[in-house]
Image (tube, coloured by chain):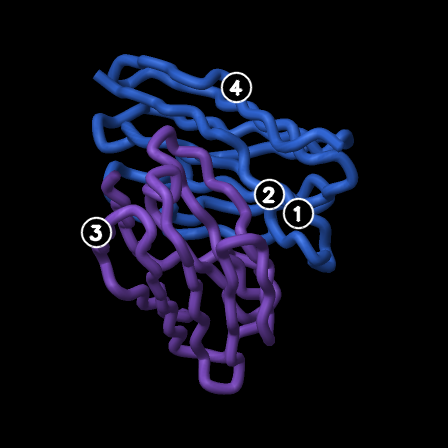
Amino acid sequence: ETGVTQSPTHLIKTRGQQVTLRCSSQSGHNTVSWYQQALGQGPQFIFQYYREEENGRGNFPPRFSGLQFPNYSSELNVNALELDDSALYLCASSLVPLGDYGYTFGSGTRLTVV
Amino acid sequence: GIQVEQSPPDLILQEGANSTLRCNFSDSVNNLQWFHQNPWGQLINLFYIPSGTKQNGRLSATTVATERYSLLYISSSQTTDSGVYFCRDPAQGGSEKLVFGKGTKLTVNP
């Protein structure tokens, strides 16, 4: 059983640029969620995808968008990067309905915007 | 939306000590989970515990859903237990949003 893998692990971008972060879900999981975690804070929910459709969104602007593919892998796209977008981005996969193990998180992508 | 409060916000222990972390919810608890985030950022599942008590080695957790709280017990703490402990529960209403508390930062000194 593979876990959740994210790529890249670290990334440096310039303000105004666009970035794509990738996530491969745990085998058998059909739901993926994305989170932004600023330094010293808890993860903040960005959005969730189930069967390739967005089915929940947190308080993030439209320049944060995503995709889920038929194999349940996912992308997070952020346009017009701002300095405040610097954070650890985490994805988590799960099986709906939830099984005994709930959500499984990846190791994250640390994005630095300069 | 559902609110999560974790206490204490910070905890410093000597190796070998025991501790109890608490998570309070403003609404009913359905799918509570405890995580440990290590100093490198990795969030590790500890327990998925909607109700009752579970134990895994030195760690155990108890959720009292009717009273909207959960406790995480760490016994005989080790330096590798250091990091931030989060609890979470999906928001009500089917969107399955994960609502995290602000976490408890645990430092275990040798």
Chain A is which colour? blue
Residue placed under numbered mark 2 in the picture: A104
Callout 3 crowding tier (Cα within 10 Å): few <14, some 14–19, many ≥20 = few
Residue at 76% from the left image edge and 30% from the top image edge? A71
Identify residue type, mark 3. Answer: Ile
- Which x, y percent locates residue A99? 72, 57
Q: Residue furthest bottom?
A: B66
Identify residue type, mark 2. Answer: Thr
Judged left or right of residue B99, residue B6 is left
Viewer-nearest residue: A110 or A107? A107
Identify residue type, mark 1. Answer: Ser
SS state under label 1: strand
Q: CA distance from mark 2 to mark 1?
A: 6 Å
Q: Quadrant of residue B93?
A: bottom right
Q: CA distance from mark 1 to mark 3?
A: 33 Å
Residue placed under numbered mark 4 in the picture: A7
Residue placed under numbered mark 1 in the picture: A94
- Which x, y percent locates residue B101? 35, 59
Residue placed under numbered mark 3 in the picture: B12
Q: Are marks 2 and 1 in contact (CB under 8 Å)?
A: yes
Compare marks 1 and 4 and give the one earlier in the sequence: 4
